[in-house]
Image (spheres, helix red, strand yellow):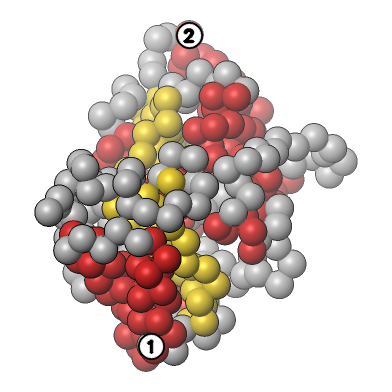
Amino acid sequence: MRVVRNSAEMQTLAVERRSRGVTVALVPTMGALHEGHLSLVRLAHEHGDEVDVTLFVNPAQFGPGEDLSQYPRTFERDVELCRAAGVSTVFCPDVGQVYAADHSTQVAETRLSTGLCGAHRPGHFDGVVTVVAKLFNIMLPSSAVFGSKDFQQARVIRRMVRDLNFPVRIVLAPIVREPDGLAMSSRNRYLSAREREQALSISRALKGAEAEAADGALDTEALGKSVESAMDAAGLTVQYVVCVDADTLEPVARLERPVLLAVAAFIGKTRLIDNVVLDLAAGADPSQAGLTPVRQG
Ligand code: AMP
């Protein structure tokens, strides 16, 4: 396994590899790897001859007052996990390798990125799509795997790839959860034992909404309210609970087509997100492992 820190070296390597006909599936991450990331790596092996992982805490996607400086960094362990997972190249540039000091170009997606997290984290998705576009140009993958834990992010990146004609197939991976239901996240490390218990209310509330939907509750406002009050009751500060069309991310009133029920909440200072896709017609949503399948009737 190669560990590359230099962008020009990485790009030269990627061009050479492509000229040999080798296909690459890329897993972009901010490091502090956990089983959710590793599930993406396993899926990536099905989509390329080689799998590359990026470890890069991207300052451009953090807002003022967010947790950029505290974000967990576990570099040595991440590299060993990648090695054990059969990764070919770990690309771990420092900020100066990714952004020229006088850079003045960025990518912006202007529709799917405006609601949900985008409404509360101005500039966040500009930072995300810009770095992903740059990583695609540096690493030249033929596919890239993203987790549905960050459902909006995956939708925004798919749109960017379509709109800008990147020759990259975007693969969506299911959410990986702890045995008790908590969605895995690098930020779970911030939680005290008590906060972790409180955080469980998120997945429990989503699971409850799934059960309500399966029992015929089709009104998204009522579903959202019950999710919000369950999280409130656990002492969380809810940032948003939304039911949106899983494709367009536009608000919907009834569960008549696949609906993304997405939440963001603070437990103390830690902001966590989670979601479930409610798709009554399709039954269980394969991208939502760990939550009870929703069935019609
Ligand atoms: P991050 O390092 O948090 O930027 O995440 C890197 C990638 O891993 C993104 O595509 C995330 O959606 C994905 N990811 C993070 N947590 C999970 C999880 N619990 N299950 C599946 N994918 C995840």
Of residue 267 and residue 62, the one placed in the foreground of this image is 267
Where in the figure is residue 255, as x and y percent of width and height? 33, 52
Q: Is residue 262 above or below residue 194?
A: above
Left or right: 67 in relation to 96: left
Q: Which mark's residue is nearer the viewer, 2 or 1? A: 1
Where in the figure is residue 8, as x and y percent of width and height? 66, 28
Residue 247: name its quadrant: top left
Q: Is mark 1 within 8 Å of ligand 1?
A: no
**Residue at position x 74%, y 67% from top?**
64
Residue 25: name its quadrant: top left
Where in the figure is residue 260, as x and y percent of width and height? 39, 52
In the rendered view of the protein, which quadrant contains the C terminus? Answer: bottom left
Res 234 label: 1
The answer to whether the residue labelled 2 contacts the one labelled 1, judged by CB atoms less than 8 Å apart, is no
**Residue at position x 32%, y 46% from top?**
256
Left or right: 109 in relation to 103: left
Q: What's the amino acid at mark 1?
A: Ala
Q: Is residue 226 above or below residue 32?
A: below
**Residue at position x 17%, y 46% from top?**
283
Left or right: 286 in relation to 187: left
Of residue 275 and residue 250, the one placed in the foreground of this image is 250
Q: Is residue 205 above or below residue 126?
A: below
**Residue at position x 71%, y 53% from top?**
123
Categorize mark 2 by other alpha carbons within 10 Å: few (<14), some (14-19), many (20+): few
Can residue 187 be seen here? The reply is no
Of residue 222 and residue 171, the one placed in the foreground of this image is 222
Res 213 label: none
In the rendered view of the protein, which quadrant contains the N terminus? Answer: top left
Between disc 2 and disc 1, whose residue precedes?
Answer: 2
Label 2, on which residue? 19
Where in the figure is residue 114, as x and y percent of width and height? 63, 50
Q: Secondary structure at mark 1?
A: loop
